[in-house]
Image (spheres, rainbow, N blue to C red):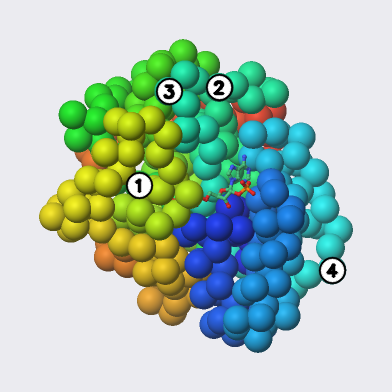
Amino acid sequence: MKKTFVVTGGNSGLGCQCAKNIAMESADNHVVIASRNMERSERAAANIAGETGNPHIYAMPLDLASQASVRDFAETFASRDLPPLYGLVCNAISGSGPSKPEYTEDGFEMTFATGHLGHFLLANLLLKNMQGGGRIVFVSSDQHDPPRMIATISYTDALDIARSRCNKHAVRYSLTKLCNLYCAYEMAERAVNNISVNAFNPGFMADTGLGGGAKSVGEKIIKRLAPLLARLMGKYSTAQISGKLLAEMMTGPRYEGVTGKYFDRGREARSSELSYSKANAVNLWERSMELTKNAHGPQKE
Ligand SMILES: NC(=O)c1ccc[n+]([C@@H]2O[C@H](COP(=O)([O-])OP(=O)(O)OC[C@H]3O[C@@H](n4cnc5c(N)ncnc54)[C@H](OP(=O)(O)O)[C@@H]3O)[C@@H](O)[C@H]2O)c1
């Protein structure tokens, strides 16, 4: 059966490997690469089509930092003559570089706005197009529960995260990755039509833009040591390995009907105690509805 999959951030790193593996699985799988840089996305689509022999790979512009862009993407997607939407991989994130927070045109902190809020809006808008039994995966991270030497986080209210003035990128990133889990768990409960929603941890991948980028000398030293530490702690991976495991969550029969779970590189795992706070998940959901002026979304009675 012909199906469409959307992968945000599908033009590089984990997302690109995921898109390639979905494409490779069947020529009936149509894959939309949704990122900002269209030149890179078109190149990635052509490479994937060439490598897999699957011609149904498309690039479509999406900037998760702009709610207008997310809405444009959803409209364009609905107008395209594609097979029914079956899978959505919420993978992209930006705002990973500077220690000083940056803000989107909508006025929200960049890491949270792209990693969570944009995906929240996108998923809710695309749900209308999604076929029964479809699958959504939110890419989270080990860093949703950071070691103390990296960051200490607490969740108060999503509004505090959206308007954060915190100067530590590690804190903003960890809170966003925690929000990916709240969002996945809450959406899994609210989703109708047998749509499953899960979260994924790819482990530490030194070979992606996120894992590989380092600017200051200190950052470069940490980035050099990080793969070694990740290996010692059993957290090491590559985009190739984790991309394949992420694609399997979209297409593999073993994930059929599985929902509301967290998978660490293919193995079901428990996320942090904080990530199971129902009150925080509901707070994030309700605030996200307000912040995206989103009247749609899956609404179970
Ligand atoms: N790397 C790691 O070690 C690691 C560990 C744990 C979790 N993760 C998670 O894995 C996911 C993928 O990370 P990665 O390491 O593969 O990063 P990456 O190589 O930097 O890729 C990021 C992708 O996101 C896209 N993107 C960035 N900002 C965007 C925006 N505003 N709107 C739409 N697309 C945007 C980029 O394309 P454009 O620039 O063209 O938009 C790119 O395709 C992230 O959720 C990250 O938190 C990574």
Q: Secondary structure at mark 2?
A: loop
* Vertical side of 150 occupied by 42: above or below: below
Image spot of residue 50 (x, y percent) = 66, 81
Image spot of residue 208 (x, y percent) = 44, 54
Callout 2: CB less than 8 Å from ligand 1: no
Question: What amino acid type should be assigned to the residue bearing mark 3?
Answer: Ser
Q: Disc 1 to disc 3, how far (Cα)?
A: 19 Å
Question: What amino acid type should be assigned to the residue bearing mark 2?
Answer: Glu
The crowding category of the residue bearing disc 4, from other C-alpha atoms within 10 Å (few below 14, some 14 to 19, many at least 20), is few
- 35 left or right of 94 in image: right
Q: Disc 2 to disc 4, how far (Cα)?
A: 37 Å
Residue bearing mark 4: 81
Residue bearing mark 1: 141
User: Quadrant of the image for the C terminus?
Assistant: top right
For the image, the number of numbered tags is 4
- 34 left or right of 206 in image: right
Q: Disc 4 to disc 1, how far (Cα)?
A: 34 Å
